Image: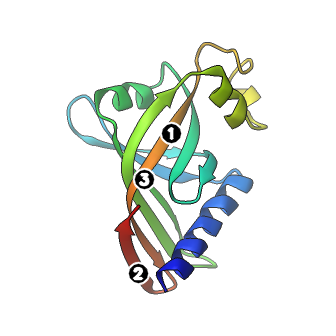
Amino acid sequence: MDNKFIEKAEEIINETIIKLGYCSLGLIDIDNFPTISTVTPAKSNGLKWITFVADLKSNKVKRINFCDKASICFNNDSPLLYNITLVGSMEVLTDRKTKEEMWYNGCEHHFSGIDDPNYCILKFNTKRYSIFIEMNEISGII
């Protein structure tokens, strides 16, 4: 049963990425308070990791540099009821190879190109998950 729900959660995440959808990102700020941002995922490797495009000068990057613990939540109530919560850590990546791999249509609205000095990648690495789909819930460790 767990594999079925993990596969469904991965499908939901991939569908969100394809449609340039959104999810919520929770980080800790410099005053040790939780903050929530709406973000667009760029790519994923199942539940293992998810990337996001960001501005190197953004508050998100400042928060990650302060505390790399993070949580991501994908949810919806129609037509499929689900809540996928992932807990793990974030890292800020600035190497050209990763920036090339993660670039997608739409990034040009925010950055001049792959070599834009403010263009960076946020990589979320999952440690544990809680998946609720169609009134069924599982949780586990990656």
Numbered mark located on residue 126 in the image? 3
Specify the quadrant that holds the C terminus: bottom left
Residue 108 position, x and y percent, is: 76, 27
Q: Are marks 1 and 3 in contact (CB under 8 Å)?
A: no
How crowded pointer 1 is (Cα within 10 Å; few <14, some 14-19, many 20+) is rated as: many
As displayed, is residue 13 above or below residue 115?
below
Residue 97 position, x and y percent, is: 67, 26
How crowded pointer 2 is (Cα within 10 Å; few <14, some 14-19, many 20+) is rated as: some
How crowded pointer 3 is (Cα within 10 Å; few <14, some 14-19, many 20+) is rated as: many
As displayed, is residue 139 above or below residue 114?
below
Q: Secondary structure at mark 3?
A: strand
Residue on which disc 2 sits: 137
Q: Nearer the viewer, mark 3 or mark 2?
A: 3
Q: Secondary structure at mark 2?
A: strand
Numbered mark located on residue 123 in the image? 1
Which quadrant of the view contains residue 68? top left
Residue at x 52%, y 78% (from the top left corner): 3
137 vs 76, left or right, is left
Residues at marks 1 and 3, CA–CA distance in whole angstroms: 10 Å
Amino acid bearing label 2: Glu
Amino acid bearing label 3: Thr
Q: Secondary structure at mark 1?
A: strand
Q: Earlier in the sequence, mark 3 or mark 2?
A: 3
Residue 24 visible to an observer of this rendering: yes
Which quadrant of the view contains residue 29? top left
